Image (cartoon, rainbow, N blue to C red):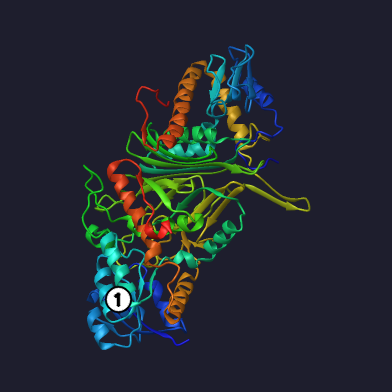
C-alpha cells in the first residue's frame, strides 16, 4: 500500500526496474544508456551528470544544474491523470473560456523546496490553460513561502500559493482550480480542503490510506508512476528531450523572475524570446 | 440587562435576512420597527417577518418611534453617511454594514459624528464571531505553527447583484464611478467591495499592518456587469508576512430576484478558507464547513447545503454589551479604516499595474 503523496522521495519503490519493464513490454530501445532518479544531489550542487548515461530527473529538482545533453529534465506532473484530465477539459472547451486559475502547493522542504514548487506550478499554469505566462508579481518570505499572481498571454490571471513549511515526511497538499465563464474545473472535491484517497484502512495498526492510479505500474504512488511515465516518453521520443530542456530553461527563468520580482517589489514581464512552453 | 430597542433601515443589504432571526430571538433586543427603500423590499419584508411595522422611509420610522436606541444600517453603501448623520442627531447607536464608505473623507466624518455624539458604532464583520475563526485565532496566538510567514485566504461567493442590484452599481457600491483602469470599460464597486473580511482577518491574525498590496483583475465571468467580478490580491504585512487573497465572485448563480433555494449554479455558493504557513508548520481551515449535500428541489443540482454558524448572535451580543456598558466594540470605525484603505489601494494597484504601499495610520502607529 502506498501513502498518498506526489513526491515520494523516501519511497523504496525501484523506479528504474519499473521503467525497464515498461520499455521491454512496449519494445522501446533507448538510444543511450539511462538512469532515472527522483532527485540528483549532484545537480543540487550545481553539477551535471557524472557519467555518459542519460540522467532523467524531475526538472523541478534540477533547477541548479548545468544543462547538458545528458540531462533530461522531466515534467512528471504532466503525466498525472488528474492534470491530463484538467487539461483536456480546457482543450475540449468543456469549460471555456478560462479566466482565472487558482493553484496551490504546500510541501515538505526536504522533498520539494520552494523553487521546485514554483517551477511545477508555473508549468502547470501554462500547460493546463494553454497560454504562456507574460508577467508575474511575487511576494516571498525567506524562500519558505510565496504568493504569486501570473498573467498569461490570453488574459487569464492565475494565483500560485506555495510554501515549503510542512513537517518532514508530510504528504504534499495541493489544489488546482480553473475558473471559466462556463464552468469550473478542479482536482479537489467541492467543499473539501485536502486530497481524498481511494482506499482508507483503519485497523489495530492505525490508519492507512492509499491511492493506486496505474495498473501497469501497480505499487507506485501517483508521483512515482507519473515520473516513470514521463521518463518512458522521454526515452521513447529522443526529439522530445530538446523541447524538455527548452521548457526547463524557461521555467528556471520564471522561478528566477519570481525571486527578482519579490526583491524589486515590481511586476516583471517575461521576455517573449525566452522559449515557448510546448 | 434591559433589552435594546432596535430597528433596521433600508433592508436592501445582502445580510438583511440574516438579522431577522437574531432580532426576533435575542432576549437582549426588542425589535421595534423597520424601514424599507421601496415597496418591493417592503413586501418582501412582510413575507418574511410579521409583527414588526415597516415604514416607507427611515425618517418616518424614527419620528414614529423615538424610543429606538439602535439601528442596523442594512442599506447600500452610498446611503450610510446620511443615515449615520440621522442616527447621530437622534443619539441612536449604529450597527453598520461591512463597508461604511470607501470615501475616506466621508469615513472620517462618520468617526467624528459617532465620537461627538458618544455613540457605539460597530462594523458588521461577522467572521470574528465564527467558531472556526475563533479556533484559528487561538491556535495562532498559542504558537501552534510559530510565527506566520504566509497567509492565503479566500472569500469567494456567487454574485448577489441580481437580488441586490446596488452591489452592481459603481455609484451605490463604491460611491462614485471610477474606471478600473485606462482602457477598461468596467468600474470599481464589484466583488472586492463585497469582501472586506479577509483583509480584516490578516490584520487580526498577524497583529501587523498591511504594508503593500498588488492586485489584478481577470476578464469578467458575467460580461453584463459593469463592475469587476474576478480579482486576486497579494502583498505583505509590515512584519514581512506575505499574503494572497481571493475576494472574487467566482461562483456562478441563477439570477434570482430573491435569494433562496436554487440560487447556486456552482454547488457551493460561498467559501472562506484560510491556509496559514508558519515557521513551525501549516494550518488549513474552512470557516464554513463541513456541510451537508443534496441534489433535490428545486433544480436537482448537486448543492452544498450550509450548516451555518451563529455569527450574528455573537455579533449582536457584543453590540448590546457595548451599548449598555458604554464601550466600543473590537471592530469599530477606527479599527476598520486601514482595511478600507487597503481595499482602495487594491483598486489603485489595478489601475496602475504596480504595487501600492500603505502608510501606517495614526491609530496603527500607536
B2 relative to B151, above or below: below
B165 relative to A154, above or below: below
Instruction: Identify the residue shown where x is 30% and y is 76%.
Output: B9
- Chain letter for mark 1: B
The x, y position of residue B251, in whole percent, is 39, 54
**How many numbered marks, from 0 up?**
1
Q: In screen coordinates, is A137 left or right of B291?
A: left
The x, y position of residue A271, in whole percent, is 36, 26
Q: In screen coordinates, is B265 left or right of A218?
A: left
Residue B208 seen anywhere in this rendered image of the structure: yes
Please identify the quadrant where the C terminus of chain B is shown: bottom left
Q: Residues within 10 Å of mark 1 (few under 14, many from 20)?
A: many
The residue that label 1 is drawn on is B9
Residue B302 seen anywhere in this rendered image of the structure: no
The x, y position of residue B82, in whole percent, is 24, 71
The x, y position of residue A177, in whole percent, is 45, 45
Check disc 1 and report its element: helix, strand or loop: strand
Q: Nearer the viewer, residue B56 or A217?
A: B56
Q: Nearer the viewer, residue B145 or B263?
A: B145
Q: Nearer the viewer, residue A169 or A188?
A: A169
Instruction: Identify the residue shown where x is 50% and y is 68%.
Output: B309
Q: Determine the residue located farthest toward the right in the rendered image.
A: A204
Amino acid at each position: 500500500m502506498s501513502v498518498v503523496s506526489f513526491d515520494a522521495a523516501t519511497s523504496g519503490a525501484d523506479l528504474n526496474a519499473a521503467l525497464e519493464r515498461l520499455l521491454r513490454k512496449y519494445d522501446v530501445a533507448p538510444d543511450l544508456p539511462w538512469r532515472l532518479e527522483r532527485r540528483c544531489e549532484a545537480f543540487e550542487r550545481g553539477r551535471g551528470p557524472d557519467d555518459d548515461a542519460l540522467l532523467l530527473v524531475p526538472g523541478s529538482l534540477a533547477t541548479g544544474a548545468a544543462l547538458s545533453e545528458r540531462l533530461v529534465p522531466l515534467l512528471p506532473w504532466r503525466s498525472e491523470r488528474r492534470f491530463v484530465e484538467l487539461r483536456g477539459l480546457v482543450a475540449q472547451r468543456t469549460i471555456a473560456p478560462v479566466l482565472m486559475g487558482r493553484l496551490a502547493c504546500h510541501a515538505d522542504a526536504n522533498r520539494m523546496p520552494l523553487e521546485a514548487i514554483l517551477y511545477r506550478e508555473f508549468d502547470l499554469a501554462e500547460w493546463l490553460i494553454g497560454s504562456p505566462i507574460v508577467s508575474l508579481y511575487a511576494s516571498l518570505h525567506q524562500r519558505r513561502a510565496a504568493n504569486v499572481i501570473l498573467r498569461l498571454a490570453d488574459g487569464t490571471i492565475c494565483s500560485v500559493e506555495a510554501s515549503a513549511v510542512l513537517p518532514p515526511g508530510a504528504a504534499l497538499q495541493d489544489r488546482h482550480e480553473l475558473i471559466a465563464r462556463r464552468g469550473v474545473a478542479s482536482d479537489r472535491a467541492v467543499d473539501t480542503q485536502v486530497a481524498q484517497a481511494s482506499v482508507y484502512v483503519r485497523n489495530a495498526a492505525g490508519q492507512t490510506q492509499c491511492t493506486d492510479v496505474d495498473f501497469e505500474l501497480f505499487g507506485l504512488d501517483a508521483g512515482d508512476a507519473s515520473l516513470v511515465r514521463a521518463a518512458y516518453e522521454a526515452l521513447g521520443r529522443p526529439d522530445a528531450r530538446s523541447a524538455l530542456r527548452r521548457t526547463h530553461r524557461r521555467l528556471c527563468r520564471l522561478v528566477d523572475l519570481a525571486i527578482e520580482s519579490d526583491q524589486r517589489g515590481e511586476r516583471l514581464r517575461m521576455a517573449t524570446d525566452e522559449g515557448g512552453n510546448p | 440587562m434591559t433589552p435594546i430597542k432596535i430597528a433596521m433601515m433600508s433592508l436592501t443589504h445582502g445580510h438583511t435576512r440574516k438579522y431577522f432571526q437574531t432580532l426576533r430571538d435575542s432576549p437582549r433586543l426588542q425589535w421595534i420597527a423597520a424601514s424599507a427603500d421601496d415597496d418591493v423590499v417592503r413586501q418582501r419584508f412582510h413575507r418574511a417577518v410579521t409583527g414588526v411595522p415597516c415604514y416607507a422611509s427611515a425618517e418616518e420610522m424614527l419620528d414614529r418611534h423615538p424610543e429606538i436606541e439602535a439601528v442596523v444600517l442594512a442599506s447600500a453603501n452610498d446611503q450610510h453617511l446620511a443615515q449615520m448623520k440621522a442616527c447621530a442627531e437622534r443619539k441612536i447607536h449604529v450597527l453598520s454594514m461591512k463597508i461604511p464608505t470607501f470615501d475616506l473623507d466621508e469615513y472620517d466624518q462618520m468617526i467624528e459624528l459617532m465620537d461627538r455624539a458618544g455613540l457605539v458604532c460597530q462594523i458588521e464583520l461577522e467572521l470574528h464571531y465564527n467558531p472556526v475563526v475563533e479556533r484559528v485565532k487561538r491556535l495562532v496566538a498559542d504558537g501552534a505553527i510559530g510565527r506566520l510567514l504566509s497567509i492565503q485566504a479566500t472569500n469567494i461567493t456567487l454574485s448577489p447583484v441580481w437580488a441586490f442590484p446596488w452591489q452592481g452599481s459603481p455609484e451605490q457600491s463604491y460611491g462614485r464611478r471610477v474606471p478600473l483602469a485606462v482602457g477598461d470599460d468596467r468600474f470599481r464597486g464589484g466583488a472586492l467591495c463585497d469582501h472586506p473580511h479577509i483583509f480584516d482577518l490578516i490584520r487580526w491574525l498577524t497583529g501587523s499592518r498591511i504594508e503593500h498590496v498588488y492586485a489584478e483583475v481577470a476578464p469578467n465571468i458575467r460580461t453584463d456587469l459593469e463592475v469587476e467580478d474576478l480579482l486576486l490580491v497579494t502583498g505583505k504585512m509590515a512584519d514581512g508576512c506575505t499574503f494572497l487573497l481571493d475576494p472574487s465572485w467566482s461562483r456562478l448563480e441563477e439570477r434570482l430576484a430573491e435569494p433562496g433555494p436554487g440560487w447556486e449554479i456552482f454547488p457551493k455558493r460561498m467559501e472562506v478558507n484560510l491556509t496559514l504557513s508558519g515557521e513551525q508548520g501549516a494550518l488549513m481551515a474552512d470557516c464554513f464547513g463541513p456541510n451537508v449535500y443534496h441534489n433535490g428541489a428545486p433544480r436537482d443540482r448537486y448543492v452544498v447545503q450550509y450548516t451555518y454558524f451563529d455569527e450574528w448572535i455573537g455579533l449582536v451580543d457584543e453590540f448590546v454589551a457595548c451599548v449598555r456598558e458604554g464601550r466600543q466594540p473590537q471592530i469599530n470605525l477606527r479599527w476598520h479604516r486601514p482595511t478600507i484603505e487597503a481595499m482602495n489601494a487594491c483598486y489603485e494597484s489595478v489601475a496602475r499595474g504596480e504595487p501600492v504601499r500603505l502608510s501606517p495610520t495614526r491609530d496603527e502607529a500607536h
